[in-house]
Amino acid sequence: MHKVLLSVLLSFILLAAGSTVAFALQSGGYTVGDLATGSVVGQPFSSLDVDLEFTALDIGGKKVWYPGTAILDLRNSGTMGRRGQPILFKVTNATKAEHGFAFSADSPFAGPTSMQIKIKVPAGGTKYIGIPVSDLTYVTAAGNLKAKCQLHAGHLASSVMILK
Ligand SMILES: [Cu+2]
């Protein structure tokens, strides 16, 4: 068992050492923009489907990222499947104050280029976030990430379960 783990680990190290600069730059990258002008890895946001939608709400005086749980299904399904199509998030702030949207694949075991998304969304504003699919499939963290607000400690987070 340990030998298998070791060889997997070694092949990852070899892969990392042999990879090009372009690969390193691509990993951990994301883009933020609006639907009309934004793009990620050369694909316009307007040509992609929105995978997940998050909305900042005030519910009973509590700040929340809605929904509280979201599922991002990256399993190949149907003919041709997803084929590496980038992921698109739509993030809307339906409150009267600015909120943050932080979504990270960071963990004690993650590489230095692991995905680290941190943006601010103005009151009433909407932003689109494009994420290369490799950033979510190569992460070493568990498939359960949190979408948080980095501006307010009491702002309830959304749990994002990634099926891959
Ligand atoms: Cu907030």
Image: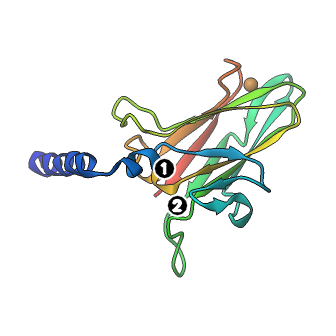
Dot 1 and dot 2 residues touching (CB under 8 Å):
yes
Residue type, numbered disc 1: Leu
Residue in view at x 60 percent, y 60 percent: 42
Residue furthest toward the front? 21
Name the residue beneath numbered marker 2: 74
Residue in view at x 46 percent, y 49 percent: 26
Residue in view at x 54 percent, y 69 percent: 82
Q: Quadrant of residue 114?
A: top left
Mark 2, Cα crowd under 10 Å, few <14 / some 14-19 / many 20+, is some
Name the residue beneath numbered marker 1: 136
User: Horizontal and vertical percent for residue 70?
Assistant: 64, 48
* 79 vs 24, nearest the viewer: 24
- The residue carrying mark 1 has its beta carbon less than 8 Å from ligand 1: no
The disc label shown at residue 49, or none: none
Residue type, numbered disc 2: Leu
Left or right of 13? Residue 147 is: right
User: Horizontal and vertical percent for residue 162?
Assistant: 52, 51
Residue furthest toward the bottom? 79
Q: Quick one: SS at disc 2?
A: loop
User: Horizontal and vertical percent for residue 110?
Assistant: 37, 36
- In this view, 35 is above or below 2: below
Mark nearer the viewer, 1 or 2: 1
- In this view, 16 is above or below 75: above
Quarter of the render that holds ligand 1? top right
Q: Quick one: SS at disc 1?
A: helix
What whole-number distance in Å separates the C-alpha atoms at marks 1 and 2? 9 Å
Query: Which of marks 2 and 1 precedes in the sequence?
Result: 2
